[in-house]
Amino acid sequence: MSSRGQFNFVWLFAIIAGGAILFLAIYGAMQFSDTAQYQSDTEIAKSISILTDPLQAGFSEGSTGRIEFREETRINNFCYDDGFGRNDISVASRPDADEDWNLAGGATSIHNKYIFSAERSDGLDYYVFSKPFEFPYKVADLIFLTSDSYCFANAPDEIVDEVINMNLPNVEAGNCTGKENVRVCFGFGNDCDMTVYGTCGSGCDSSYDTGKVERGGAETHFVGNLMWAAIFSDRVVYECNVKRLLYRTGIIAVELMGKVDLMDARGCDSNLKPSLSVWASATGNASSRDLSGLNMAAKSIDVKNDKELCGVW
Amino acid sequence: MVGVRRINTRGQFKIQQMAFMIMAVFFFFILVGLFFVGWQFKDIKSSAEQLHEDQAISSMKVVADMTELNCNSREDFCLDEDKLKVMTNSNLSRVYTDFWPVASVKVYKVYPAFDNVVECPGADCNYYEIFDNGQRNVKEFSTYVSICKKLKESGYVYDRCDIGKLLVGVTIHDEDEE
């Protein structure tokens, strides 16, 4: 009787201990799987930062690229506008469309780039392209990241030409098939997700040199290549990145004032210092609402610089 | 009475034996787990270093083409000597502390050749330390660049260029340091 009791106790003990070990092993494996997924998503976020390096326009008019993922990927882009600010890029993935998204990996902070995208975009293929931002000197390259396809309705010839020259596979200008996710109307149109208005009246290459994008009742103002940014990014990301760009514009103006001093010292005179000083204080704390007014000042400074024998830029 | 005591002793011995066995199995799994985690961390560390290296290499063109450094001549890998001086000689370098994607940015002049490294600002200097985050164990990658400045002579303006080297550093993790 007692022998059978002892036998049962041994079995009970072994089952409990074995169960505990098995439970811990399964729990550990699941935790490890989550950690591996987190690691992979964190690496992808960092890779996006690196992959966009060669895609920066540099001295060209623009450049285009495509990032393909093996599984559906969500890219989060959170922008912070204190000083130079930053874009925090994090990535989450899911193996199937029916499943929930995994927890996003660690965010990669990018301080020296201006990534315009939705705050949260999903997809297998992402299109990346870049355009320079000159105000009036080159400030930075604007990087656009999108997984959506766009239809540009009623786009003027210069915009259509630019889309064709850039070879943007996710943008149809003129020959829309109706399969596109986002319909962008220029000036007017039906069933528009957003409407782009050009407001440049005189001394412009195109009426869309300055303007605004109206989406869901809200307006975002743009100049030059920021038009693409206003189209391809959320308003929050756009406003934040524009503030960052204008802050950097002001800091570069301060640096150029230092350059003027050095040039003056060796006889390569320049009269741009007072204009640059005003420009630095005007842009340092500006936002997208000030772009239109600043654009006039930028053009005036650029004309002054062109007239100088020793141009500062 | 005696028989019952003998059975209890044997039962206690069995329980002790099993407890030791379970402890041993636990320790075995913990050791295997630790070994695996260590191996994984090494993997994470090496991929982090690889990503840092990739970033440093790809950042070289980005750094050289930045308006803060380049010479506006619409040429790649061309640095403006005046801008280099301003970046090393003013409070601007402090403003840019968090901005750089790498651990250090330095520029040397390599031609005309020099005997001693003289840090700028200074007379006949040939070395500009644009940024250094102060970290040790920095692995540096370099590329040749033009270092140009505008000069005006007899009413003509021209660019005078020297040959230089742009060095960007990436932090590496040394096993001995841990």
Image (cartoon, helix red, strand yellow):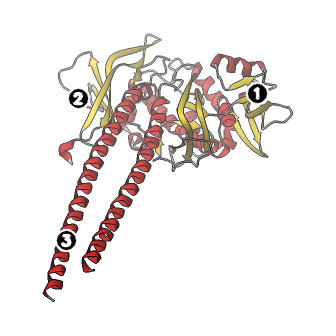
Distance between mark 2 and mark 3 Cα atoms:
79 Å
Q: Is residue A141 above or below residue B92?
A: above
Q: Residue at x 20, y 43 (%)?
A: B175
Secondary structure under tag 1 reads strand
User: Farthest bottom residue?
Assistant: B1
Q: Earlier in the sequence, mark 2 or mark 3?
A: 3
The amino acid on which the numbered mark 3 sits, given as a three-letter code, is Lys
Q: Within 10 Å of the Cα at label 2, are there few (<14), some (14-19), or many (20+) other Cα atoms?
A: some
Distance between mark 3 and mark 1 Cα atoms:
80 Å
Q: Is residue A181 above or below residue B15?
A: above
Along the line of sight, the residue nearer the viewer: B52 or A68: A68
Numbered mark located on residue A183 in the image: none
Q: Residue at x 41, y 29 (%)?
A: B59
- Whole-percent x, y for residue A205 in the image: 72, 21
Along the line of sight, the residue nearer the viewer: A276 or A294: A294
Q: Nearer the viewer, mark 2 or mark 1?
A: 1
Q: Which residue is mark 3?
A: B14
The amino acid on which the numbered mark 2 sits, given as a three-letter code, is Val
Q: Within 10 Å of the Cα at label 1, are there few (<14), some (14-19), or many (20+) other Cα atoms?
A: many
Left or right: residue A22 compared with residue A153 = left
On-image quarter of the N terminus of chain A: bottom left
Q: Quadrant of residue B165?
A: top left
Q: Which residue is mark 1?
A: A152
Q: Is residue B26 above or below residue B63?
A: below
Query: What is the chain identity of the residue bearing mark 1?
Result: A
The amino acid on which the numbered mark 1 sits, given as a three-letter code, is Phe
Secondary structure under tag 2 reads loop
Residues at badges 2 and 1 in contact (C-beta under 8 Å)?
no
Q: Which residue is mark 2?
A: B118
- Whole-percent x, y for residue B149 in the image: 40, 20
- Whole-percent x, y for residue A236 in the image: 64, 46
Q: Nearer the viewer, mark 2 or mark 3?
A: 3
